[in-house]
Amino acid sequence: MSIKLKICGLKNSENISGVTNLHPDYIGFIFYKGSLRNASGILNPEFCETIDRSIKKVGVFVDDLEDRIINYIALYHLDLVQLHGNESPEVCERIRKYAPVIKAFGVDEKFDFEKTTAYKNSCDYFLFDTKTEKHGGSGNTFDHELLKNYKGEKKFFL
């Protein structure tokens, strides 16, 4: 198993520059209007072009319009898209034509990992996150022992 680092929730150029100096594998920009870390209207698209290409840029969306996601892939030069809402496998498949897709699932002791099976051919990665009332980024961890219930072969993020 190889470990890769993804730092998410960045929105201003000073923070992004500081983080990119640490050379993470991925940096994430949240484009969800319901998030305090929403980068829409703050993140400069031209600045995104200057980010070291070895650091993959991930756009995080929640139940957003497909056209908006596709537009943001081009505008912000996104390398991957993370879908954190109730997007169907069909939506994931359509978005995947423009960028690799990470499909997020909220995990708690009741989560059925079989739910991921429907997405195995429409996503490139899964993300298992703590289930909360809001969408991701709570800072809380779920019981990682629950991962023993995941029988799939798709690589995943925590």
Image (spheres, rainbow, N blue to C red):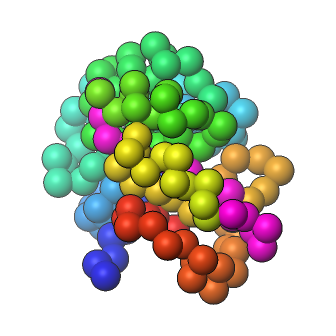
Residue, far right? 133
Q: What stretch is highlighted in magenta?
A: 98-112
In the displayed structure, would residue 65 be above or below residue 140? above
Residue sitting nearer the eye, 130 or 119 = 119
Q: Where is residue 51 in the image (x, y as percent from the top left)?
A: 23, 44
Q: Which residue is drawn at 40% across and 54% down?
A: 125
Residue, far bottom? 145
In the displayed structure, would residue 71 be above or below residue 2? above
In the displayed structure, would residue 17 be above or below residue 131? above
Q: Where is residue 127 in the image (x, y as percent from the top left)?
A: 51, 58
Hey, which quadrant is residue 64 in on the image? top right
Q: Which residue is drawn at 45% across and 67% down?
A: 152
One can see residue 72 in this view:
no
One can see residue 117 in this view:
yes
Q: In this view, does 2 lie to the left or right of 145?
A: left
Hey, which quadrant is residue 57 in on the image? top left
Q: Where is residue 157 in the image (x, y as percent from the top left)?
A: 45, 64
